[in-house]
């Protein structure tokens, strides 16, 4: 399990925030963030709640109690999403980009398949005709 200082730094980098920007979101200077990430200081409960909210993680995850970002998943937030995010966060930046590219490819493939199926259903020949439509020559 990771410590708070490690989780904070990883989450901040993952979200593309500098220490200055995160400090501004929390209404204090970057030195406070630097001190948190070095382990010199620890935030209070109110600030921990804000940090967890900024990164959309539970306090348990932020504090290193669990590796699941949102262990108390609701029906709208299924278990597999937490698992995916947990594994994704363990990848280096290059591999995270590769996962994103692969995900985009999968979505494009799905879209093409739906378009093809839709086109196929429109172009099917009518097999049966009503008596009115049938004409003898």
Image (cartoon, rainbow, N blue to C red):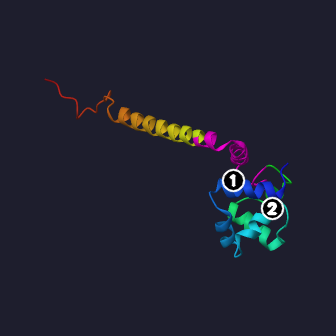
- Residue bounds of the magenta highlight: 68-97
**N-terminal label among 2 and 1:** 2
Query: What x and y, as percent, mark residue 58?
Result: 77, 59
Residue found at x 74% / y 56% = 9
Residue found at x 71% / y 56% = 11
Badge 2 marks a residue whose secondary structure is helix
Q: Quadrant of residue 52?
A: bottom right
Please give the residue where the numbered disc 1 appears in the rendered image. Answer: 77
Instruction: Tell me whether the residue at label 2 lies in contact with that at label 1, contact meaning CB atoms closer than 8 angstroms.
Output: no
Q: Quadrant of residue 17?
A: bottom right
Q: Is residue 88 left or right of residue 120?
A: right
Binning the other alpha carbons within 10 Å of mark 2 as few (below 14), some (14 to 19) or many (20 upward) gives many
Binning the other alpha carbons within 10 Å of mark 1 as few (below 14), some (14 to 19) or many (20 upward) gives few
Query: What x and y, as percent, mark residue 91?
Result: 69, 41
Q: Is residue 101 left or right of residue 22?
A: left
Residue 118 in view, yes or no = yes
Please give the residue where the numbered disc 2 appears in the rendered image. Answer: 59
35 or 73: nearer the eye?
A: 35
Nearest to the eye among marks 2 and 1: give it: 2
Location of residue 13 with respect to 40 vertically, above or below = above
């Amino acid at each position: 399990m990771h410590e708070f200082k490690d989780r904070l730094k990883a989450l901040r980098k993952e979200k593309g925030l500098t220490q200055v920007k995160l400090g501004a979101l929390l209404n204090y200077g970057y030195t406070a963030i630097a001190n948190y990430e070095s382990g010199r200081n620890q935030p209070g409960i109110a600030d921990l709640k804000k940090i967890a909210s900024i990164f959309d993680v539970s306090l348990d995850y932020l504090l290193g109690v669990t590796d699941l970002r949102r262990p108390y998943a609701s029906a709208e937030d299924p278990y597999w999403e937490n698992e995916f995010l947990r594994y994704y966060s363990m990848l280096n930046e290059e591999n995270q980009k590769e996962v994103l590219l692969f995900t985009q490819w999968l979505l494009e493939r799905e879209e093409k398949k739906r378009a093809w199926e839709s086109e196929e259903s429109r172009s099917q020949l009518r097999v049966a005709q009503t008596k009115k439509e049938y004409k003898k020559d």
